[in-house]
Image (cartoon, rainbow, N blue to C red):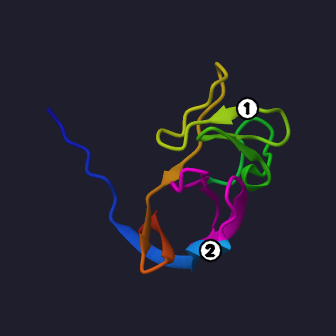
């Protein structure tokens, strides 16, 4: 039985919590990646890849339906926990761990 270890992460501060609008996304560049960060009405913060695998739509320009990220181009929905899409045959998006420490939002990205 083999075990796959998750790659080590590097956390980087991207903004203050109050800089994230409730119910909307914001795009950030981090480690050569474009990442969409969302703050739900319930206060949960999560981060996903900022590119829909269907047609490349900028997910940060989308909206939230509950806690699902909705692509602004074709309304495909992505689960922020697993990255999976609600449409058959569409690949998911990468997700990133988020932590809030002292009012600062930090995103974990894999160390290359």
Q: Which residues are the magenta region? A: 20-48
Between label 1 and label 2, give the one nearer the viewer. 2
Does the magenta-highlighted stretch encompass residue 32? yes
Q: Considering the image in quadrants, where does the C terminus appear?
A: bottom left
Along the line of sight, the residue nearer the viewer: 12 or 40 = 40
Classify mark 1: helix, strand or loop. Answer: loop
Q: Position of residue 94 (x, y in %)?
A: 54, 48
Please tell me how crowded label 2 is: few (under 14), some (14-19), or many (20+) other residues with Cα within 10 Å: few
Q: Considering the image in quadrants, where does the N terminus appear?
A: top left
Q: Is residue 63 left or right of residue 11?
A: right
Q: Is residue 108 left or right of residue 73?
A: left
110 vs 31: above or below = above
Please tell me how crowded label 1 is: few (under 14), some (14-19), or many (20+) other residues with Cα within 10 Å: many
Disc number placed over residue 30 in the picture, else none: none
Query: Label 1, on which residue?
Result: 76
97 vs 14: above or below = above
Q: Is residue 45 left or right of residue 4?
A: right
Residue sitting at the far front:
42
Q: Position of residue 99 (x, y in %)?
A: 42, 66
Q: Residue at x 61, y 30 (%)?
A: 85
Q: Residue at x 18, y 37 (%)?
A: 2
Classify mark 2: helix, strand or loop. Answer: helix
Q: Position of residue 78 (x, y in %)?
A: 62, 37
Along the line of sight, the residue nearer the viewer: 64 or 92 = 64
Q: Are marks 1 and 2 in contact (CB under 8 Å)?
A: no
Q: Residue at x 78, y 52 (%)?
A: 58
Sequence-first tag of 1 and 2: 2
Query: Label 2, on which residue?
Result: 18
């Amino acid at each position: 039985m083999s075990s796959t270890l998750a790659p080590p992460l590097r956390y980087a501060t991207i903004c203050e919590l109050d800089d994230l609008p409730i119910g909307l996304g914001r795009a950030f560049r981090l480690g050569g990646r474009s990442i969409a960060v969302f703050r739900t009405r319930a206060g949960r913060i999560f981060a996903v890849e900022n590119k829909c695998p269907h047609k490349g739509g900028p997910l940060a320009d989308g909206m939230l339906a509950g806690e699902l990220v909705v692509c602004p181009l074709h309304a495909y929905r992505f689960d922020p926990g697993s990255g999976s899409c609600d449409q058959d045959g569409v690949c998911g998006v990468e997700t990133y761990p988020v932590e809030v420490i002292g009012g600062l939002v930090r995103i974990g990205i894999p160390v290359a």
